[in-house]
Image (cartoon, rainbow, N blue to C red):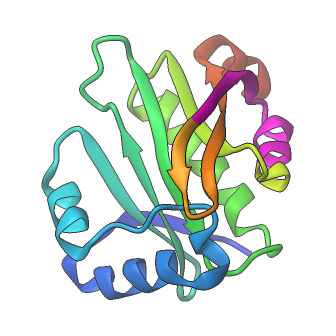
C-alpha cells in the first residue's frame, strides 16, 4: 500500500468534514466548521493535506510553520480506514517532510489520554512522551487530559540513519 500527501483543496472539504464528523472519529477530534477549514487552507502558518492512495483515506493539519523555535505541531490527523497502515505511513511521511523539508527542530502532537492505540503508534515511530496536560480540554463527557509526544531533529536523524 502506497500513499501520498497532497494539499487539501476546497473540493476536498466535504470529505474532511464528513471524516471528522464520523462517529468513530468524533471521540478523538473536535470537528471544525467548513469556514474554519477554509481559513486553514489560506493560513501560511498551517499545512492542510489529504492522505490518499487510490482514494482519500484521511487528512492532516500541521501548525507552527512560522515558528521561530522551529517547532511544528501535528495539529490533527484523522484516518478513515483504521488498522490498514494508513495512519502509520502518513505519520512517517509527515515526519520526513517536517524534518527534511521544513527544517524543524521539534515535531510534536497531543493525544487524548484514553487513546492508547495512537500513543503506542507515535512511540513506536520514535516519538517520546514529554508530559500530560491534565484536564485541559472539555469534551462531551467532561474534561480530558492530553498526552504530549514529540521527536527532536537529532532523534529523527538516528532513526533514518
Compared to residue 53, the image places residue 159 above or below, namely above
Above or below, 135 relative to 31:
above
Compared across the picture, whether 15 is left or right of 91 comes to left
Is 20 placed above or below 63 here? below
Q: Is residue 73 left or right of residue 1?
A: left
Q: Which residue is drawn at 57% across and 72% down?
A: 26
The x and y percentages for residue 87 are 69, 62
Q: Where is residue 71 in the image (x, y as percent from the top left)?
A: 43, 21
Image-based side of 113 in relation to 40, left or right = right
Q: Quadrant of residue 9?
A: bottom left
**For the point 56% across and 87% down, which residue is it?**
54
Q: Which residue is drawn at 38% across and 80% down?
A: 17
As drawn, the residue found furthest toward the front would be: 142
Tell me, yes or no, whether the highlighted magenta stretch contains residue 28.
Answer: no
**Highlighted magenta segment, given as a residue range:** 119-135
The quarter in which the N terminus is drawn is bottom right
Q: Where is residue 119 in the image (x, y as percent from the top left)?
A: 79, 44
The residue closer to the viewer here, 70 or 160, is 70
Asked which quadrant contains residue 63, the reply is top left
Where is residue 30? Give x, y as percent.
46, 62
Amino acid at each position: 500500500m502506497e500513499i501520498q500527501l497532497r494539499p487539501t483543496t476546497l473540493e476536498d472539504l466535504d470529505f474532511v468534514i464528513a471524516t471528522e464528523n464520523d462517529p468513530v472519529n468524533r471521540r478523538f477530534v473536535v470537528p471544525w466548521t467548513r469556514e474554519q477549514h477554509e481559513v486553514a487552507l489560506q493560513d501560511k502558518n498551517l499545512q492542510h493535506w489529504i492522505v490518499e492512495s487510490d482514494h482519500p483515506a484521511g487528512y492532516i493539519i500541521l501548525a507552527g510553520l512560522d515558528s521561530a523555535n522551529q517547532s511544528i505541531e501535528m495539529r490533527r490527523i484523522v484516518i478513515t480506514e483504521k488498522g490498514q497502515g494508513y495512519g502509520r505511513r502518513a505519520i512517517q511521511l509527515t515526519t520526513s517532510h517536517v524534518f527534511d523539508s521544513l527544517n524543524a527542530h521539534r515535531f510534536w502532537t497531543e493525544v487524548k489520554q484514553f487513546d492508547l492505540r495512537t500513543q503506542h503508534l507515535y512511540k513506536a515511530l520514535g516519538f517520546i512522551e514529554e508530559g500530560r496536560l491534565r484536564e485541559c480540554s472539555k469534551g462531551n463527557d467532561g474534561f480530558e487530559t492530553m498526552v504530549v509526544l514529540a521527536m527532536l531533529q537529532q532523534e529523527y536523524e538516528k532513526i533514518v540513519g
